[in-house]
Image (cartoon, rainbow, N blue to C red):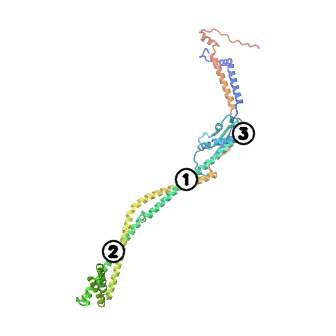
Amino acid sequence: MINPAKTYTLHEYLEILRRRIWYIVIPFVLIVAVASVYALTAHKLYKASTLVLVSPQRVPEAFVQATVTSRVEERLQSIAQEVMSRTRLEQIISEYNLYEKEAKSLSKEELVELMRKNIKVELPTKKDDKGYFTISFIGDNPKMVTTIANRLASLFIEENLRIREQQAVGTTEFLAAELAIAKKKLDEMESAVAGYKRRHMGELPEQRDTNIKILEQLQNQNQKLGENLRAAQDRKLFIQKQMSDMEMPAASSAGPTAASPDAAAAEMGPSYEAMKERLTRELETLRTRYTENHPDVIAAKKRLADLERNKATYDARDFRKDPRYKELKNQLTLTDMEIKRLTDETAAISEQISKYFSRIERTPAREQDMAALLREYESTKDNYERLLKKSQEAQQAENLEKRQKGEQFRVIDPARLPERPFSPDIPKILLVSLLAGLGGGLAAAFLREQMDRSFHDAADVEITLGLKVLATIPKIEDTTT
């Protein structure tokens, strides 16, 4: 092109088009012809698609909460990995005799990989529209791709049911195992609490008020026993004084005559029984020290024999046979028994008071121990109750999946026999070839026009030669026919 800055008119563009027509026609025809031949001779592939609906569970979630809570796309990835595993795909290839031609040159692994590439799982592009997905299969046999697409859809449905049921069963088993552990720990805590209460019965915090009341009662009872004991002791002293007053006149009336048996009996003691008991003890004591021939032992035996001989004299003068004296003696005996009983009861009450004092003093320590035990017990109990509730919910969810009442995949649009090949796309190829041919022709004409150094008008001459054109001869066309 001689004048790049030249402005063209529509007439000049038409002139260029007429002049370079073959540069446009030849590339256009070649490109379209090549594309048409490719479209007619290329290996045809067909695509069959199955539309699968993700239907929600039939039982409202307010009543039964499903254990499978993962999103559809996450589960589809897991299901696709299982369905498109080497074992599954080899089984389908063998069952339907797929890729017979390719099997001659490819290994089984390569055939499986080829089939994986021909399987398409597509989710809707909109984020809010996740209620369905499509499963497609591409192949060269229309009937076979339809069959395989429907078979893959059924495998996805079966695998989804299996995975959901397996996950529900696994959840139930896990929670059952955890529940058993929690139950065992709860039983141990209950046994620990019960054992602690048994070991420290009476010292527990809830028994503090009872212990205080019992302690007050024991103290009051001990006070009364003390008063009764002092009264009994005073009564004993009074009785003893009365008995002494009765004994004193009898002892003085006997006289101090030592030679008479009565005087000897009076010197030996106030009564026959007391004298005999004293002489017998004295004789036994001497026998432990001396032999029977010892003078002291012989003298003791003589005194005991004299006492036996003078028994009638003692009985005649024994004031203890006086009914009043006997009554006082009985009263003294009863008073001694009462004093002993009151003393024993006071000791027992004092022991009980000490016992309850110790219980009350140990109550704060038991309260701390019980608080720690009960905290752990309540925590274990709460954990057990939560696991029990979750286990029951998991069991319901498992029953829901086994009865196929949960979320399911359902085919709503099964694969149909494709009427046209999926690849190559002939209309698209022809359209692209037309556009490419036209673009190629125009590009060739443009390049040829840029390389042209010939003169086409006066401006080209003036620019090239630098001379002023005075006149031009128009193109002479032969209009005769």
Q: Earlier in the sequence, mark 3 or mark 2?
A: 3
Residue 226, label in figure: 2
**Mark 2 and mark 1 in contact (Cβ < 8 Å)?**
no
Pointers 1 and 3 in contact (CB under 8 A)?
no
Quick one: label 3, few (<14), some, or many (20+) residues within 10 Å? some
Q: Residues within 10 Å of mark 1 (few under 14, many from 20)?
A: many
The total number of labels drawn is 3
Report which quarter residue 424 is drawn in: top right
Of callouts 1 and 2, the N-terminal one: 1
Q: Which residue is mark 3?
A: 143
Badge 2: few (under 14), some or many (20 or more) residues near its Cα, within 10 Å? some
Q: Nearer the viewer, residue 298 or 234?
A: 298
Tag 1: residue type?
Leu
Q: CA distance from mark 1 to mark 2?
A: 67 Å
Q: Quadrant of the N terminus?
A: top right
Residue pointed to by mark 1 = 175
Front residue of 35/306: it is 306
Horizontal and vertical percent position of residue 6: 60, 16
